[in-house]
Image (cartoon, rainbow, N blue to C red):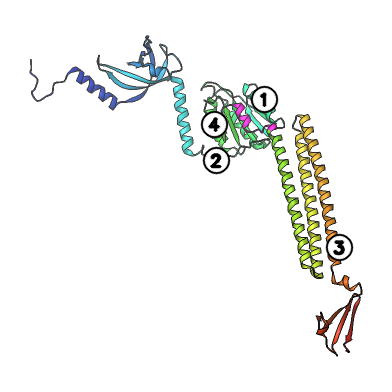
Amino acid sequence: MPAAPANEAIWSVSALNFEIRTLLEQGVGRIWLEGEISNFAAPASGHWYFTLKDERAQLRAAMFRNRNGRVGFRPRNGQQVLIRAQVTLYEARGEFQLVVEHLEEAGIGRLMRDYEALKKRLSDEGLFDESRKKPVPAAALRIGIVTSPSGAAIRDALSVIRRRSPMSRVILYPVPVQGEQAAGPIARAIQVANQRRECDVLLLIRGGGSLEDLWCFNDEKLARVIADSKLPIVSGVGHEIDFTIADFAADLRAPTPSVAAETVTADQYELMSRIDRLQARLAQLQREQLKQNSQRISQLIQRLRAQHPERQLLSMRRQLRFAASSLVQAMKGRLQQQHSRQTLLRQRLHHQHPGRQIQYCRQRVEQWIHRQDQQIHRLLEHKRQQLQLQARSLDDLSPLKTLGRGFAAIEKQGRLVHSAQDLETGDSVSLRFSDGQRRARIDD
């Protein structure tokens, strides 16, 4: 029997198994494998033990309790599965095995790989960039819906639209939403909607389902049609946890069909409340405008009083009349604009529902307009009376009024004479009366 060489190390079994385990875990590491389950066992410990095999070979595998609790099904013998596992060695018995970290049915695994590959490719291409997204209207009056006419999704969406925005018009583009051939009709429906331009936004909706049920929404051609759409598209496919390629290509993703309908409709009660707030704001702005105009008229009157000469008085009268006329025209224009706006609001409310609240709002608006008309007319009449009174007061203070009472103004060399000391014998003076002038000479 040959002796061991003195210069070579002698390994123990445990050291060798440890070294092989290290080489496997670091050299091969975690990998994906597909195969058939056999010899499946689930003891009381909660761990799963099975053999993964194909036509030519097999491997022992273990999936521990903290991992298999995340699997949504219980494996069975003969089932094809896709696993992600750590390649290792069970040192105690020197057995080569797999420690499974993730397990799924093989068919779904392939779909998921295809889904992730397409998602990455289109994302790298820039198809999902936010810069491509179009703004989605928050209160659309023409809503297009691309979905099955008999599914729960259309019923949920119509229920939300009728409740929140009964004035909105719905255009249905009926399409199949399940099956390998469904992607084509969906894409054509979107293209038809873009050609007709009969709606403001498109809802692409479908109820929940399995990955296979929703697979038509992972079609590349459909994604490109959605991205190229001129109309904004809101995607509401499946449940909140379901994500499809169509969701990423759409301008907005809603977690459910109902939420998609809510996203593009304005609540009618919130709309009426907003109208009330706008009316109050309009009344406040009008009061402020009236106050500013009143202050401006008062300032003009004070300037007229201070400046006094006839030419400036006439000029200021013209400016004041112009300002008053502009104020009247501005107020009439504002009233006409407000009246037109109120008429438009009444027409919109008339088509919206509910009738009793709309009638009540209409009565309130008409009463408010009537009160505002009366208030403005009273204010204008009051300002006109003030203007006439001020004009008469200024006229009473005019020098020509004084001359009309029998007085005369004496001017010497174009300057007004205020005292007899300013005149000498022989001076030529001008006497100005209310109806003309005369020349005179000072004798004594």
The three-letter amino acid code for the residue at tag 2 is Arg
Choose mark 2 or mark 1, whichever is in front.
1
Q: Determine if residue 185 is in view.
A: no
Pointer 3 local density, CA inside 10 Å: few below 14, some 14–19, many at least 20: few
**Residue 159 has which mark?**
1
Query: Disc 3, disc 4: CB below 8 Å?
Result: no
Could you say where residue 415 lies in the image, as x and y percent from the top left? 80, 81
Q: Determine if residue 430 is in view.
A: yes
Q: CA distance from mark 2 to mark 4?
A: 14 Å
Residue 183 lies within the magenta run:
no
**Residue 392 has which mark?**
3
Residue at point 74% right, 32% down?
352
The three-letter amino acid code for the residue at tag 4 is Asp
Q: Which residue is mark 2?
A: 132
SS label for mark 1: helix
In depth, the one of 90 and 429 nearer the eye is 429
Choose mark 4 or mark 1, whichever is in front.
1
Is 112 on the left-hand or right-hand side of 291? left
SS label for mark 3: helix
Magenta residues, start to end = 255-269
Q: Earlier in the sequence, mark 2 or mark 4?
A: 2
Could you say where residue 298 lies in the image, as x and y percent from the top left? 76, 58
Among the 4 quarters of the image, the one containing residue 69: top left
The three-letter amino acid code for the residue at tag 1 is Ser
**Residue 247 has which mark?**
4
